[in-house]
Every structure is written in structure tokens, then in C-alpha cells.
Amino acid sequence: MKLALCFDNHRTDHHEVVERMCRAQSLHPGHTYRIMELPGGAIGCVTTSDRFSAVPHLLTSQGGNLLVVSGVPLLLSGALAARLQQICNLDHDAAGDALSQLDGAFAALHWDHAGRKLTIVTDFLGCQPLYQHMSEGVLLMATDIKGVMAAGGIDNALDPLGWGSFLSLGYFIDNRTSIQKVEIASPGTISVYDPRAGRLQQRSYWQWEAPAPELRLQEIDTGELVDQLEGHMRAAQEHNQAATLLLSGGFDSRLLLCTLLRAGITPRVMIHDHPDEDRNADGRYARAVAQRYGLVPEIITPSKGFFSSQEYLEFLSLNEMTTPSLNLFIAQLSLCFKQRLDDSRDAGGPGLQAIWEGVGPGNSLYPSIQTAGGFDNYFRLLVPSREGPTWRSIRTVFAPALADEMYDGIQDVLARERKKYPDDEYGVRYFIMVTRVRNRAAANPLKIYANYVLPFTPGLSRDFMNAVTRIPYHLKYNLDLYFKIFRDQFPAAMEVPWCTGGVLISTRGRMNPVHRIYNAIEKMGLIEKIKKYPLAEAAARKLGGQPGLHQRNPLVEKIINAVDPDHTDLNGEGIRRIKTGQLPRSEDLQARTMLFYWQMWRAMMSGQPAN
């Protein structure tokens, strides 16, 4: 379910505003919406994949209260449906406290009819998308950025920090988005809005537990971790009992499969081939795992023309340029889910309704994107050099003053963000969880796939996240923790090798030595320097088993040819150099991709269709 909310003391057409917001977020013929008018405002809800949940996401009370829930909340003990009805009956203070006890990814709106107050609760990591705009006497909220923008009256001016972080890091930071006046709702927060006063009060309800830097591998209770995952799976069953497992050659999906089978749940299995990495090792290993457990998988073969198709433009409409996606092979899964939904609507059958997708929001048991030590080491890996090809491409595409504002904004916000956490591996881990994991890893299942299927992400609970985050980095980075889990709990699963992130790992837990060298080079931050030399980069990518650089995309060329080089956001001279093919190879593809994203974003935030 998607949310839309408008409270505005300066207007009376709240119903019409929320209807525009709902229409902007209805991205499939099966999406329907409903609007509830309230004193001083209105709330709308768009039915999407929640139609496949046995748990109601819209509830009312006899006293006039209203509860609307987006996402897949979990109650690890007890019946969720009954608990949500109890919460709906509560006043705003008690409802906020009760909602904050739920796990899973969700965002909830509770209207207290007697108290005339609205309570907004985000999940503890803020993984469920919720965007907001606030000004004097005005509160707008929606599940999609375009939903907020559809309310009208908001300038669609580019946010330099949001765009700088998107282009250079691959995700938003500091609750910023691509729009200056639209923010991401804060994670783990209870907010109470008084529409009569136009005042929003907020308080955080969750924090990380103390780390355990001295913990040894043999002291970790892997049975407890698996028990927690199993508990999450059983809780998700209250929503839907027919979820399909997305099985890859990696660790997370294999752990989910083993845990599901241990819980007595035999899932349907779907495998998405990845032929451009190591002769489809990912797909081959996934098939072998399915065969080992007597399962017959459905095989998804990627379309070679997907990234130059109308279907990819539709994906961008779902993604809203919140994460880079051009040539990202898992983006094609959204097309698969949409086709399954369309087929089931035509045939009148149940179709694909829910998926098991990853452990938590990702990167919890194997911190592949982290480095040892504190923020200096991590930022050296994370932030591209100002003189490197990424920022040269940004300066080529965007107006010089705007490009400088992007870079300076990132430096300032990273300096502020690091002060919130300890300057050690745990501080870095907390930062990663509330930035990259929340705003990038969680986007595919919770923002995109959820338009078509219920996304189940076992492990997205406070207890599990605290349990795995407190474990020292050195026990996870070399996959020691993962192998201990499999050795202790599921030894038969180790009979098939792994492929994770293009890296091949043997049944004995040994990384392919070539891939080990590539990983070491990457952790030293040398890949960014190698990008200056296209042939060297191509060799390094081949060495690491990564997909090769793609040639020019006809869709990208079509879109950027329509760009007005004199737009105030842009570097006119640089745009003309791009269009006439005058850039060096080290910058050409990246600059074209950035310009493509910008042009698509402009159209999308102006309400234009994806074509």
C-alpha cells in the first residue's frame, strides 16, 4: 500500500490534492485508491501488493480513528491483524508507542479522532519509503517522491546534495532527496502532527545496542540467529503463505532456503540468470542448490534489450532516480513481477503474490562494502576523488557552480554525519545501515518490487540487526560468520560453491585467488584511479569477474538528444561536447548516463509519462 497525506490550513481542497497524489503513485492498472477526508486534511491509500496480504492495511474504529499501514509490518509474537485493530482504537500517544514495537519494513499513519492529531511512525531503520514536505501550516507525505510533487505548489528545483550523493555515491544521505523541498522521513521515529497548530513533534524510539569487539567466532550462537530468521518467516506467513524464493548463487538466498525448509515451509523457487558474469555462475550454482533440495525452479532469462526498452523507462518511474540502475541486471526482475501480475489478472488465477528477498535490507551478515577501521579508511573508499573521472563527468554535465555546490555539500554532510557515531568499525557500520542499506539496498524490494508483489525480507528486526551488527567486522568480512552458520546449521548446503557479487567461492570457503586480488585492489580505492584508463579498467573488471563496460545505449542517446544544453542546471559547453562525441573515453559513458538520469528525472517530476 502507498500513502498520500495532505494537511494544509490555507486550503480546503484536500480531497482533490490527495487524489492527485494517489493518481501519481498508481503505476499499474491493478492499483486502486481510496481517500478519507479528515478535519483540516485528507489521507489517501493506494492498494498495490497489499491486496495479497491477509492482514488489513487500512483499519477504522467505531470512535472514528483511522490506521493506514504501508509495507510489511511484522509481529514476532501474536496475531498482527488483531494487534493492528487494537492499535487503531488507541489514542495518538499510545498508538505511536504500540506501532514502534513492530518489526519489518513499514510506515504507519494513525488518526486520533477525539484528539484531532495524526501520528506517523517509521520502521526502526526507515527502510520503508516515505517522503515529506513541510512548510508553515502544510504537511505533505507520500510513498513516492512524485506523489508529494503531485500535490502542487512545490518547486522542482534540484537538490545539489541529493544529486551529488546520488551521482558519486549511488544513494541519498542525510534524509535528502533529488528535490530541494522534499525529504525522506527520519528512521525509527514517532511523529505527532497537530493540524490546528500546524506543529510536528518528533522523537526517536530506537538505538543500537553496545557492540562486542572482543567477541570470538566460537562464541557466536548461530542457532539463535537462524531461530530469529525462522521467527520472521513465520510472522510473514500471516500476510501470505505462498511466497516465492528468489534463489541466486549467493549466501543470503541459500540461507533463507535452508531456514524455510527447516521451518517446514517449501517455497516455490525463481532463479534469474546472470550470463555476463563468469559464464552464468550465479545461475548455475542456484540451479545446483535447487536440485540438491529437490526443487524445480522457474528460470528467468534476462532480455538483452531491456535497458533500451519502454519497460526500463517504466522501471525508472518506479525507482524515481533514487539509485543508479542503468545496466543493473536485477532491475529486470521488476518486469518479471509485472508480467506475472498481468498474467494472473488475465487468467484470473493467484499468480505470483509474494517473494522472499534477501536477509534484512542486505549487507548484514557479510559487510562487503565496508573497510576495517574508522571513517577515514571508509571515506577513502567511498568518496570519489574530486579530480577523478566521476567528478570530472559531473562537472562536464552540470553548471560549474552547481557541481561545486554538490561536491562541497557532500564533504560538509559527511563531516557532520561521522560526528554522530564512534570513529571505529561500528560507527562506520551504523552509518552504512542508515544510509547505503536504507536508501539503496532496500530500494529494490521495498520501493520497486512492492508495486507488484509483497516483499518479505527476513532479518529486518531490531533484535536480529543488533545481534549481527555487534559482531566484529573481521569475523564477517572474510565470510567466517557465514561459513560458521552453514557448518553449524546446514552443512549439506556447502556442497555447492557460491557466487556473490561476481566473486566465486569454493565449497571449502576459499575465494577465487583472482577475485581476491581484485577485492584487495578495490578496498585500496585503486579502481577509481584505474577508471582514468579505459583499457586498464576493462582488464580490471575482467579480472574481478565484473560485467564489461556497455556500449552506447540507443535509448540513452534518444533521451540526451532531447536535452536543452542551455538549461540553468547544465554546463552548456559540456553538453554540446557530449552530443558531438568530444569527451575522452574515460568520461564519455559516465557523463552520458548522468545526463540521461537528469533528463528522465526532469520529465518524471513534471508529471510527464515515461516514454
Image (tube, grey):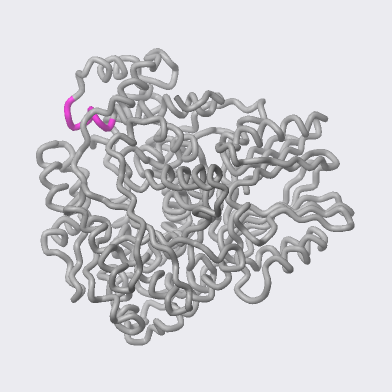
The residue lying furthest to the front in this view is 347
Q: Is residue 309 visible?
A: yes
Q: Main secondary structure of the magenta part?
A: helix
Tell me the residue at 18%/59% (across/down): 520
Closer to us: 498 or 362: 498
Tell me the residue at 69%/40% (across/down): 33
Closer to us: 359 or 264: 264
Residue interval drawn in magenta: 584-590
Q: Is residue 588 magenta?
A: yes
Tell me the residue at 49%/32% (across/down): 159
- Where in the figure is residue 306, as x and y percent of width and height? 33, 36
- Where in the figure is residue 92, as x and y percent of width and height? 79, 58
- Where in the figure is residue 523, as x and y percent of width and height? 23, 56
Give above or below for 255 relative to 182: below
Give above or below for 528 relative to 357: above
Give above or below for 181 relative to 488: above
Q: Quadrant of residue 407?
A: top left
Tell me the residue at 43%/49% (across/down): 440
Q: Is residue 357 left or right of residue 486?
A: right
- Where in the figure is residue 402, as x and y percent of width and height? 41, 26
